[in-house]
């Protein structure tokens, strides 16, 4: 449920509404203060709330029942774009943030060489993936945890960049945080694993949530809301959740075999219409082919993504994981051209609730 206060409603009026919701129904409220009005989001099972009684309170403009299961991630709940600050990088809004680095840490020399290439290319966040979720037990699944995290820390120290790493095993979370991993990534295979999402709702570290292999948009955003909500198994509010969620689109499985995944570029503006969360893409995993990565990266930027993450390897021909989609010296050109394209287009995505069409027409008119 969302309660829109009237323009000019006083803080005292807003507080009285919150007190009534908490006293009468025991539900948690979150206040979003916008440019010209205040919105109160009611969390938990809001069906018990008598909206007529709430509508009569001073300062209330209207009460809206949200049918979406992902209200925390919905733009109906928060009009302005969420911007997440991490290690000097700003992710979301009108920013273009690029994550790059090896798909897996294989050894110290490979990891550090790949990190240097990514740093020189101009990425904002360094991929330092310790664990790998694989289809076959015979595929490379990463170094032992302690050794991998030690190298990840070296990559961070040498480049000065914040690091992102995929968490597969919940038992590794404390070690990731202790090591100084700045962004936890949830891979496509884990995108709906509720115990993992629930645990990540309790930490104050940004989370990149990948699009599941067969998830539709509602399922994906519901998974994001799982991290954000702080609601337990009984639907009770037990905390404020983790608001630092970054969506990452990589496409879904389909009958097409020419690309690794079906990457619907129209999903980029659609997601930004529906959600205030930062949205990045993955041109490497969606295409599976380094000859396609560059163009797909530009398409993501042009469609309004807040950035992308891609595979950078010091020697793709010898990579133990996804060498076919990893780039090397091309990384600098891809990053530079992406920033030029972003600067030329501006943010023609969804900026503070503005529609793509309106933003594009405004740019043309100016």
Image (tube, rainbow, N blue to C red):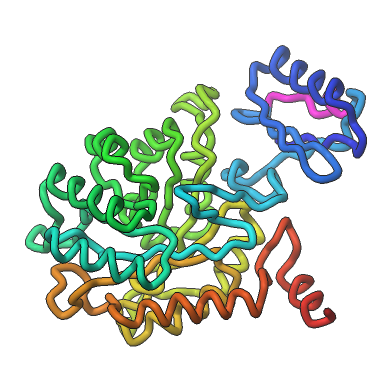
Which residue lies most toward the left here?
138
Residue 187, image quadrant: bottom left
Residue sitting nearer the eye, 72 or 157: 157
Which residue lies most toward the top here?
23
Q: Position of residue 43 (x, y in %)?
A: 62, 30
Count of numbered badges drawn on the protein: 0
Residue sitting nearer the eye, 173 or 182: 182
Residue 150, relative to residue 342: is it above or below?
above
Q: Is residue 72 left or right of residue 144?
A: right
Q: Does the magenta stretch include residue 51?
A: yes
Say which quadrant the N terminus sits in: top right
Residue at the image point whose x is 57% and y is 73% from the top: 266
Residue at the image point whose x is 19% and y is 61% from the top: 135
Residue 29, image quadrant: top right
Residue 2, relative to residue 51: is it above or below?
below
Q: Where is residue 64 in the image (x, y as percent from the top left)?
A: 77, 39
Q: In this view, does 57 lie to the left or right of 108?
A: right
Residue 260, image quadrant: bottom left
Residue at the image point whose x is 40% and y is 40% from the top: 197
Residue at the image point whose x is 63% and y is 48% from the top: 74
Residue sitting nearer the eye, 149 or 224: 149
Q: Does the magenta stretch include residue 133?
A: no
Q: Main secondary structure of the magenta part?
A: helix
Task: Specify the segment rendered in magenta.
Answer: 48-55
Q: Where is residue 283 in the image (x, y as percent from the top left)?
A: 40, 73
Q: Is residue 282 left or right of residue 301?
A: left
Q: Position of residue 366 (x, y in %)?
A: 83, 79
């Amino acid at each position: 449920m969302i309660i829109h206060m009237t323009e000019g409603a006083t803080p005292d009026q807003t507080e009285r509404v919150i007190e009534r919701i908490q006293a009468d129904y025991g539900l948690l409220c979150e206040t979003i203060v916008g440019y010209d009005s205040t919105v109160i989001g009611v969390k938990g099972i809001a069906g018990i709330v008598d909206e007529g009684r709430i509508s009569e309170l001073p300062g209330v403009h209207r009460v809206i029942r949200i049918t979406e299961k992902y209200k925390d991630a919905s733009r109906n709940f928060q009009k302005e774009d969420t911007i997440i600050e991490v290690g000097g990088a700003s992710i979301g809004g009108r920013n273009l943030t690029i994550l790059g680095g090896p798909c897996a840490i294989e050894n110290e020399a490979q990891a550090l060489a790949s990190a240097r290439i990514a740093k020189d290319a101009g990425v904002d966040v360094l991929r330092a993936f310790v664990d790998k979720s694989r289809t076959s037990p015979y595929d490379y699944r990463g170094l032992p945890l302690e050794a991998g995290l030690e190298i990840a820390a070296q990559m961070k120290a040498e480049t000065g960049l914040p690091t992102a790493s995929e968490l597969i095993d919940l038992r590794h979370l404390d070690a990731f945080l202790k090591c100084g991993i700045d962004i936890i990534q949830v891979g496509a295979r884990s995108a709906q694993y509720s115990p993992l999402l629930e645990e990540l709702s309790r930490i104050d570290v940004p989370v990149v949530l990948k699009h599941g292999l067969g998830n539709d948009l509602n399922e994906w955003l519901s998974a994001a809301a799982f991290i954000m909500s702080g609601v337990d198994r009984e639907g009770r509010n037990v905390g404020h959740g983790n608001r630092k969620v970054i969506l990452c689109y990589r496409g879904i499985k389909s009958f097409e075999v020419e690309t690794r995944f079906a990457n619907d570029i129209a999903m980029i503006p659609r997601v930004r219409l529906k959600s205030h969360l930062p949205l990045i893409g993955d041109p490497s995993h969606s295409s599976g082919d380094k000859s396609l990565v560059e163009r797909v990266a530009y398409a993501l930027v042009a469609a309004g993504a807040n950035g992308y993450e891609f595979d950078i390897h010091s020697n793709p021909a010898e990579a133990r994981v996804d060498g076919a989609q990893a780039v090397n010296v091309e990384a600098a050109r891809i990053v530079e051209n992406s920033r030029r394209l972003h600067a030329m287009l501006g943010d023609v995505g969804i900026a503070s609730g503005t529609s793509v069409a309106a933003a594009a027409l405004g740019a043309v008119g100016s």
